[in-house]
Image (cartoon, rainbow, N blue to C red):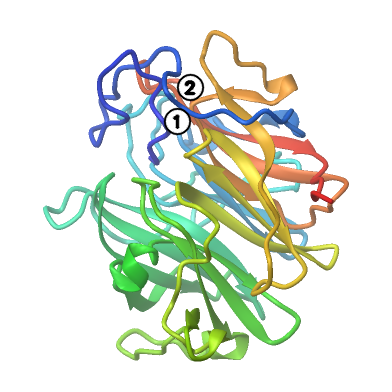
């Protein structure tokens, strides 16, 4: 359960409890003047035949000819708190978001992928942030949440059996890189590195940091062995350079959920832009080069005037680019949570072009 911006008549911007928060029309949230470029293809969830009612996220990862979608706090019923609580949960489907089977050992029910109990006193839930496949192994990065505002730590899990079972291979300090080491977006690249674009937690008030690791090193990660990611940073005597302390990428603040992809030889980040209440994209020729100005993919709106066919979505968040997308035909997974009624609480598929600014 990842908190969206709350459309408030006063009251708080969100709630750390599962009871929701005041909601209504947007007030005081900047808007983009651009027209959105995406329109809705379908709802991905609920998938009640596999025990998935209300849920969010749906982080996509290519696994052979299928796509694994990894969801956050998931409930049996359609509303938050209704029935069996699990997180993370996985469902397999195609690039269009049509679900075919659950991930995990049970072919009839989407079980919790990781073995733990909720509300332990130390933390309440574990939420996914990114998932990739490398040489047949899956890597899932997660946040261990004490509340929606407090991250205890993050971890990297590995599966060697197609998401049936997972083991933690690395743990990370959420306070690293000035607190911008919480939500990750991983992307293996042809140059032999896996790049890691990261920001802060669910307060969505931070900027971006960039790290990398030789992709072959991912396979050597083991719990208890500390392998450092190489940061990208700026120093007065060197300028921007790999190996410098991690430095803000100077692309503004207010970043939420992230996705990083190499599409048609172009680097693309898609993300929830909390500062402008939208799903946005930026483009670059090199991951450590100059990034474009943001482009609006979907615009946030109120429940009274949302129109998914026109790209206006109330209380939206997420924004994960589906593997196999092209610049002319992209697919993006977006979440929606009505924090007053706690329904809808779901993941959706949107499609359309990614238009790089000239």
- Where is residue 3? Give x, y as percent: 38, 37
Residue positioned most to the front: 236
Determine whether 266 is above or below 358 in the image: below
In this rendered view, identify the residue nearer to me: 50 or 314.
Answer: 314
Tell me the tag on residue 54.
1
Q: Which residue is drawn at 52% across and 62% down?
A: 250
SS class of the residue under badge 2?
A: loop
104 left or right of 19 in image: right
Which numbered dot is residue 71?
A: none
Given contact means CB atoms under 8 Å apart, are the residues at marks 2 and 1 in contact?
yes
Q: Residue at x 32, y 29 (%)?
A: 13
Secondary structure of residue under mark 1:
loop
Q: Is residue 163 visible?
A: no
Q: What residue appears at the point 73 percent right and 58 percent down from the top-left corner?
A: 283
Q: Image height check: is 51 above or below 232? A: above
Q: Nearer the viewer, mark 2 or mark 1?
A: 2
Locate the N terminus by quadrant. top left
Q: Which of 97 and 242 is in front in this view?
A: 242
The image quarter containing residue 179 is: bottom left
Describe residue 53's horizontal placement relative to residue 225 as left or right. Answer: right
Give the residue at x 52% y 30%: 48
The x, y position of residue 355, in whole percent, is: 82, 45
Q: Horizontally, is 333 left or right of 336 in the view?
A: right
Q: Nearer the viewer, residue 271 or 2?
A: 271
Q: Residue furthest right?
A: 328
Upstream in the sequence, badge 2 or badge 1? Answer: 1
Q: Where is residue 45 in the image (x, y as percent from the top left)?
A: 57, 33
Q: Mark 2 points at which residue?
A: 344
Left or right: where does residue 341 sit relative to residue 93?
Answer: left
Can residue 336 be seen by looking at this rendering? yes
Judge the density around disc 2: few (<14), some (14-19), many (≥20) Cα neighbours within 10 Å: some
Task: Judge the density around disc 1: few (<14), some (14-19), many (≥20) Cα neighbours within 10 Å.
Answer: many
């Amino acid at each position: 359960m990842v908190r969206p911006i709350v459309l408030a008549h006063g009251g708080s911007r969100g709630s750390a409890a599962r009871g929701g928060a005041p909601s209504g029309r947007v007030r005081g949230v900047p808007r983009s003047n651009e027209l959105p470029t995406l329109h809705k293809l379908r709802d991905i969830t609920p998938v009640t035949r596999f025990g998935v009612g209300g849920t969010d996220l749906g982080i996509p990862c290519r696994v052979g000819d299928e796509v694994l979608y990894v969801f956050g706090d998931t409930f049996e019923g359609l509303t938050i708190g209704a029935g069996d609580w699990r997180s993370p949960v996985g469902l397999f489907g195609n690039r269009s978001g049509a679900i075919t089977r659950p991930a995990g050992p049970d072919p009839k029910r989407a079980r919790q992928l990781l073995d733990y109990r909720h509300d332990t006193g130390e933390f309440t839930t574990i939420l996914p942030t990114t998932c990739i496949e490398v040489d047949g192994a899956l890597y899932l990065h997660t946040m261990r949440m004490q509340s929606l505002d407090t991250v205890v730590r993050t971890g990297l899990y590995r599966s060697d059996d197609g998401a049936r079972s997972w083991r933690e291979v690395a743990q990370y300090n959420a306070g690293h890189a000035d607190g911008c080491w919480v939500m990750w977006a991983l992307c293996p690249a042809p140059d032999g590195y896996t790049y890691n674009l990261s920001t802060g937690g669910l307060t969505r008030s931070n900027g971006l940091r960039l790290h990398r690791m030789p992709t072959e090193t991912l396979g050597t990660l083991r719990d208890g062995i500390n392998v450092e990611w190489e940061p990208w940073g700026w120093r007065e005597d060197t300028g921007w350079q790999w190996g410098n302390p991690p430095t803000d990428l100077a692309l503004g603040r207010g970043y939420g959920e992230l996705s990083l992809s190499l599409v048609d030889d172009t680097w693309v980040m898609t993300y929830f832009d909390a500062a402008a209440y939208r799903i946005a994209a930026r483009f670059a020729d090199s991951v450590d080069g100059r990034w474009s100005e943001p482009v609006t993919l979907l615009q946030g709106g109120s429940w009274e005037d949302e129109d998914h066919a026109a790209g206006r979505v109330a209380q939206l968040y997420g924004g994960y680019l589906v593997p196999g997308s092209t610049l002319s035909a992209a697919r993006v997974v977006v979440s929606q949570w009505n924090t007053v009624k706690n329904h809808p609480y779901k993941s959706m598929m949107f499609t359309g072009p990614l238009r790089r600014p000239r």
